[in-house]
Image (spheres, rainbow, N blue to C red):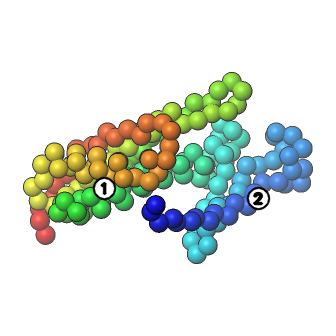
Amino acid sequence: MGALHDFTVNITWTGAGSDGTASYTSYERDHEVVIEGKPTLLGSAVPAFRGDASRYSPEDLFVASLSQCHMLWALHMAARAGVVVVGYTDRATGTMRVESAGAGQFVEVTLHPRLTVQGDVDEATITKIHEDAHAHCFIARSVNFPVRLAPVSTDVVATR
């Protein structure tokens, strides 16, 4: 058995107002996500569920966590393969289905990573980096829906 790592996140609801949950419309969905030693994230629901669009929703953070995890593993795999990555971007998208009774789930997330590399690197190497990163990503391995990869073309810059 491998090493275990624990994570603690504190959530505090700040949207009770004067009436609390007297009705579905009487309260705000605002809350704070606090992790010791890190900046506080202001959270809410998505606007479709009466949330504040200017705050992070659990769904936003969920898709972001898949994207971040892939990036961190891709950088690791690139370093292992001797590929010098000097830039990385991703425009991750997620699709969530809400059923008539109100319950729902994500049905897929698609990552669109773009690497900027130094020197001559063939596409087969870039593809292998992404495949290996995907196979190792802790978050992608933990979900019960497809996390798809649709890499955007690789940018190449001159060696420094």
Q: Secondary structure at mark 1?
A: helix
Q: Which residue is at a point 11% across and 65% down the rendered structure image?
A: 159
What label sits on residue 74 in the rendered view?
1
Among the two numbered marks 2 and 1 on one chain, the one whose residue lies closer to the N terminus: 2
Q: Nearer the viewer, residue 121 or 24?
A: 121
35 is higher (above) or lower (below) than 124: below
Instruction: Answer with the quarter of the image where residue 2 lies.
Output: bottom left
Where does residue 135 sit, x and y in percent of width and height?
35, 48
Q: Which residue is at a point 27% across and 43% down the rendered structure image?
A: 152
Residue furthest to the top in view is: 100
Q: Secondary structure at mark 2?
A: loop
Where does residue 70 sit, x and y in percent of width and height?
37, 52
Residue 95 visible in this rendered orientation of the protein = no
What label sits on residue 14 in the rendered view?
2
Where does residue 66 sit, x and y in percent of width and height?
45, 49
Where does residue 36 sit, x and y in percent of width and height?
61, 73
Residue 20 visible in this rendered orientation of the protein = yes
Q: Which residue is at a point 82% across and 54% down the rendered structure image?
A: 16
Q: For mark 1, does the 10 Å Cα neighbourhood hold few (<14), some (14 to 19), or many (20 or more) residues?
A: many
- C-alpha distance separating marks 2 and 1: 37 Å
Residue furthest to the left in view is: 120
Q: For mark 2, does the 10 Å Cα neighbourhood hold few (<14), some (14 to 19), or many (20 or more) residues?
A: some
Q: Which residue is at a point 71% across and 53% down the rendered structure image?
A: 30
Residue furthest to the front in view is: 1
Q: Amino acid at mark 1?
A: Ala
Instruction: Answer with the quarter of the image where residue 86 lies.
Output: bottom left
